[in-house]
Image: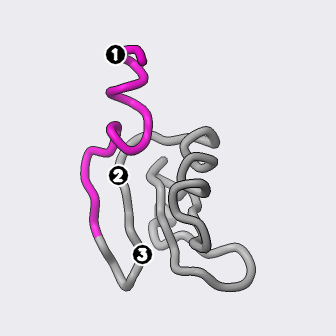
């Protein structure tokens, strides 16, 4: 574990966490590696990266979820 990984990787890299309409929103700068980790951490849920570089953990369901944060 490097300092860079500790400060910038999910979950320790999250600047803020919110729960909005049943969706966990982790604010920070995340990428596909964090998305893969979230899929393993929250089985049955639908994680997605949003337009602001944050990570959203959506409830289970069919299809790809639409991020709540769209950057508009």
Against 20, is 1 above or below?
above
Indicate how the structure is coloured in the image: one colour
Element carrying mark 1: helix
Against 5, is 10 above or below?
below
Query: Does 33 appear in magenta?
Result: no
Q: Residues within 10 Å of mark 2 (few under 14, many from 20)?
A: many
Give whichever of discs 2 and 1 has the lower sequence position: 1
Against 32, is 54 above or below?
below
Residue at 35% of width from left, 26% of height from top?
Answer: 6
Q: Specify the quadrant that holds the N terminus.
A: top left
Residue at 37% of width from left, 56% of height from top?
Answer: 26
For disc 1, the marked residue is 3
Residue 40 on image: x %, y %: 59, 54
Q: Residues within 10 Å of mark 1 (few under 14, many from 20)?
A: few
> Residue 23, labelled with which disc?
3
For disc 2, the marked residue is 27
Residues under labels 3 and 2: Cα distance?
Answer: 12 Å
Residue at 52% of width from left, 80% of height from top?
Answer: 59
């Amino acid at each position: 574990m490097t300092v860079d990984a500790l400060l910038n990787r999910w979950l320790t890299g999250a600047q803020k966490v919110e729960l909005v309409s049943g969706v966990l929103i982790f604010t920070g700068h995340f990428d596909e590696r964090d998305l893969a980790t979230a899929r393993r951490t929250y089985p049955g849920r639908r994680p997605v990266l949003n337009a602001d570089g944050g990570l959203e953990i959506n409830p289970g369901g069919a299809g790809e979820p639409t991020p709540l944060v769209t950057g508009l």
